[in-house]
Amino acid sequence: MTILSQIESTLPNLSKAESKVAAYILEHPKQTMSRHIGELSKEIGVSEPTVIRFCRTLGLDGYKSFKLSLAQSLPQTSEQLLVDITHNDSPLKIGQKIIDSAIASLQETRKNLDSPQLGKAIEALLRAERIEFYGQGGSGIVASDAQQKFFRLGTPVVAYSDPYIHCVSATLLTPGCAVVAVSHSGSSTDLLHSVKLAMENGATTIAITARQSVLAETADIVLPIDVQEDSTHYAPIKSRMSQLALLDTLAIAIAVAREDEQDLTERLSRSNDALAHKHSQNLSQ
């Protein structure tokens, strides 16, 4: 039985105040995940001890245990935040929480895959004479990873994370080019400026970003990633995992679409042979 089912079955036996807590949680489970106990009690209109009593009525030792149980009841959402990581957590527990969070992000991204937009993005990249990946900060690292995935597929490809460089490069693009802009927030002024310049020069622009962002509204094609990061954590783990998964999807889909092309097959074979030779040289040294 999930914690939500348990709350429903316990409702008739709850006090009036605890019933208010239960009703709110059943109606707003996602919002509850992002609330500290003080925020939750204030929003519901009860005291913090009431929330704790409610948790203990469910057989849990407190609010933290309740949130962990609630997170397990919502495996398909992006709301499994990292706010529950504490100084008391062991390295194993931290690893488990981070991995659970990454899994939740990938599940949410999978659920929100937009088939028409994905098809348009793949078609645009297949037609492109040149592909440029733009990103900044953590998304810049993802853009560089995309370059490594795409550079053997037969189309000239580069990745830029410096805003001055991708700004200048965008002005040199032509209608036969494609730009893939990667951004969790989709609000970077520099990135938006470069995307607009690329569009003015006729390039097709693809955004991997939040659905409601300015970047999503600007680009020709949008592959949405709507995951909520924990702002207190050290790195944007959730969005980065989803960005990498989407770029893998594009690269592999393009490779599959081109697998009948003799020249691509030969190029991939030659590049694999070169890498194998380099690896054997390193081992012999």
Image: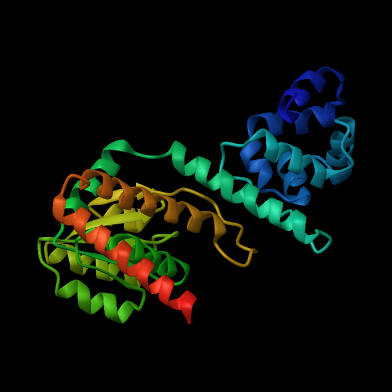
Does residue 235 sit above or below 124 in this rendering?
below
Residue 162 appears at what percent x and percent y? Answer: 35, 78
110 to the left or right of 96: left
Q: Residue at x 89, y 41 (%)?
A: 61
Does residue 13 sit above or below 65 in this rendering?
above
Most foreground residue, 229 or 96: 96
Quick one: quadrant of the N terminus? top right
Most foreground residue, 221 or 130: 130
Count of all numbered marks drawn on residues in the image = 0
Look at the image and name its color scheme. rainbow
Q: Quadrant of residue 182?
A: bottom left
128 to the left or right of 68: left
- The reply to whether residue 45 is visible in this rendering is no
149 to the left or right of 81: left
Q: Quadrant of residue 4?
A: top right
Q: Residue at x 75, y 43 (%)?
A: 68
Q: Residue at x 20, y 60 (%)?
A: 154
Residue 206 appears at what percent x and percent y? Answer: 27, 55
Q: Quadrant of residue 218?
A: bottom left
162 to the left or right of 127: right
- The reply to whether residue 14 is visible in this rendering is yes
Most foreground residue, 145 or 196: 145
Residue 181 appears at what percent x and percent y? Answer: 32, 62
Residue 48 appears at what percent x and percent y? Answer: 84, 45
Q: Residue at x 87, y 37 (%)?
A: 60
Most foreground residue, 154 or 129: 154
